[in-house]
Image (spheres, grey):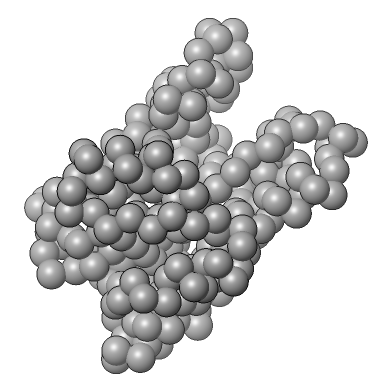
Amino acid sequence: MEITFAGKRALVTGAGKGIGRATVLALARCGAEVTAVTRTQADLDSLVRECPSVTPVCVDLADWDATEAALKDVGPVDLLVNNAACAMLQPFLEVTAEQFDMSFNINVKAALHVAQVVARGMKERGGGGSIVNISSQASQCALRDHAVYCATKGALDMLTKVMALELGPYQIRVNSVNPTVVMTEMGKIGWSDPNKASAMTSRIPLGKFAEVEDVVNSILFLLSDKSAMTNGVLLPVDGGFLAC
């Protein structure tokens, strides 16, 4: 199944590393004009060196006004991937107000805000477009020390459904991808201990974590016309974890 985004403009947040960076590169290979958004200039610089066609935007999405200013001149966007996120893990009884606010600001409020900016433009141009929010299996399954992270991803899932409901009449589709642990560079560091990893992989029927390309392929499918009748879906990329 060939997917092409020739003539399409895409915006990806959290584009500096991991899933976001791989998504930018995959979209560019499929012919899209891609705007890459992240808060770390060094990551953007290296991304542009790797893929010179990318348009870089450096902004902290936790800052509502700065985000508004940074995105106002981006131009028309047909495809949005809300990937930016943070994961501050702590036992429930040790969660602080600062950790709670930062997690919700990035994982939920920033996704809502960026989607507002993009969807308004889609609507003004007559409708049509696709938005993919990057959620997690943690939205639907309790994980130790993940109280706030689980809560943010649960909120993002419901935000996805409401966006699908309200934007659908404008032919704007909204879906989410919900991965298990993904073997990004950060994932490899956090889950390289076989004992720690086995506690999770033993609960996954396929017996392994996801690779970055597993997630990227799902994102591309949901962005593409191959999923033209798919809207409001939470797509697990988890080897069967949530099914069991």
- Please state the horizontal and vertical placement of residue 200, each as a whole percent of the image: 57, 22
Quarter residue 91 falls in = top right
- Please state the horizontal and vertical placement of residue 158, each as a whole percent of the image: 60, 64
- In the drawing, does residue 172 fall left or right of residue 110? left
Q: Residue at x 71, y 34 (%)?
A: 89
In the image, 181 versus 238, the foreground residue is 181
Q: Is residue 186 visible?
A: yes
- Please state the horizontal and vertical placement of residue 16, each as a whole percent of the image: 39, 43
The single residue placed furthest to the right in the displayed view is 93
- In the drawing, does residue 110 fall left or right of residue 77? right
Q: Is residue 182 above or below residue 110?
A: above
Q: Residue at x 59, y 8 (%)?
A: 195
Q: Is residue 227 visible?
A: no
In the image, 195 versus 35, the foreground residue is 35
In the image, 193 versus 88, the foreground residue is 88
Q: Residue at x 80, y 48 (%)?
A: 98
In the image, 244 versus 102, the foreground residue is 102
Quarter residue 224 falls in = bottom left
Q: Is residue 228 above or below residue 238?
A: below
Numbered-mark total: 0
Q: Residue at x 55, y 9 (%)?
A: 193
Which image quadrant: the C terminus? Answer: top right
Quarter residue 17 falls in = top left
- Please state the horizontal and vertical placement of residue 63, each as a whole percent of the image: 61, 62
Q: Is residue 213 above or below residue 30?
A: above
Q: Is residue 45 above or below residue 162?
A: above
